[in-house]
Image (cartoon, grey):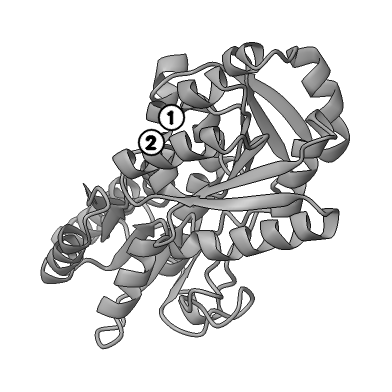
Amino acid sequence: MKKIIALALTVLIALSCLTACGKAPSGTEAGKEIKVGICNYVDDASLNQIVDNIQSRLKEIGEEKGVTFNVSYDNCNADANLMNQIISNFIADGVDIMVGVATPVAMAMQAATEDNQIPVVFAAVSDPVSTGIVESLEAPGSNVTGTSDYLDTAAVINLMFAAKQDTAKVGLLYDIGQDSSATPIAAAKADLDARGVAYADYTGTTVDEVVLAVQSLIADGVDAVFTPTDNTIMKAELSIYELLAEAGIPHYTGADSFALNGAFLGYGVDYANLGVETANMIAEVALEGKNPAELPVRTFDNGCATVNTETCEKLGYKFDDIEKAFAPFCTKVQSIVTAESFDELN
């Protein structure tokens, strides 16, 4: 009888344990911790939006899978020395995966992980192939992959002439030191050459230099200004948008955060969605064991035009007319007002 009672208790304990402990989610271990190091290049609306959505999506995935993403976040504010120190700290802390937001951070992380092969997932790298971060979009080839905010430059130029057909001279405003700007600026020049339209380069590496460049292009009488997804100009936008609007010069740019900060037009990807997809790729590498070398770079539809209605009015345009003119060249035309961050609009 004692043996029967003991056996029964053993069975009850086993059943109790199965009920209480549950079953680990498929492909993961309950309670597993993944250490993630995220470095943002600069404090601006679009890049911050990416980071926010990476972190919120990782939290969701963690809850779904029964794991914890322990995220360390830092912002180097375009300081190369600080950026390298942040990356060194991630390595010393033993992160399982690093996330570089914007091209300069992705390039620095690539260089820092050549020997240790820590997986890197980048976000918002406009041209990962020409900058040498990956071998190809389909097969990155090393420990680095991620999401690209590739800009369809021709689409932006089309919008410029849809608003004003007689545009005769275009100012190209960018930071010559930003690798991500090289390809779209070259594409813009080729497009304008084909149209027989004059253009000139105006560059700056700091906010003060960008302001001076804008003052020069105003003095030169350009009809419109084009800027790709250039982080230096994005950072300076709040300091230059009024100068351009008062001079009657529309600023056509490669991200909606430019329009949020006062530019006439921002054209490009949905950065909130880009952040979500970056987090999904992080999970694919960290939880599903996918190899970054074989995980294709994720690209997105660049069909959304964001128009700043306040600047639109200062330029003498009516939003309804602009929306109608832009519609054939976009999947969506939306409006925004000037603010320093997307949070201020909520």
Disc 1 is placed on an element classified as helix
Q: Earlier in the sequence, mark 2 or mark 1?
A: 2
Mark 1 — residue? Answer: 240
Q: Could you give the CA–CA distance between mark 2 and mark 1, rounded to whole angstroms?
A: 6 Å
Tell me where residue 310 sits by quadrant.
top right
Q: Position of residue 213 (x, y in %)?
A: 43, 42
Residue 128 makes an appearance in the image = yes
Q: Residue at x 22, y 52 (%)?
A: 76
Q: Position of residue 24 (x, y in %)?
A: 38, 58
Figure check: 39 above or below 316: below
Mark 2 — residue? Answer: 211
Q: Residue at x 55, y 83 (%)?
A: 135
Q: Is residue 226 left or right of residue 103?
A: right
Residue type for callout 2: Val
Tell me where residue 7 sits by quadrant.
bottom left
Figure check: 117 above or below 155: below
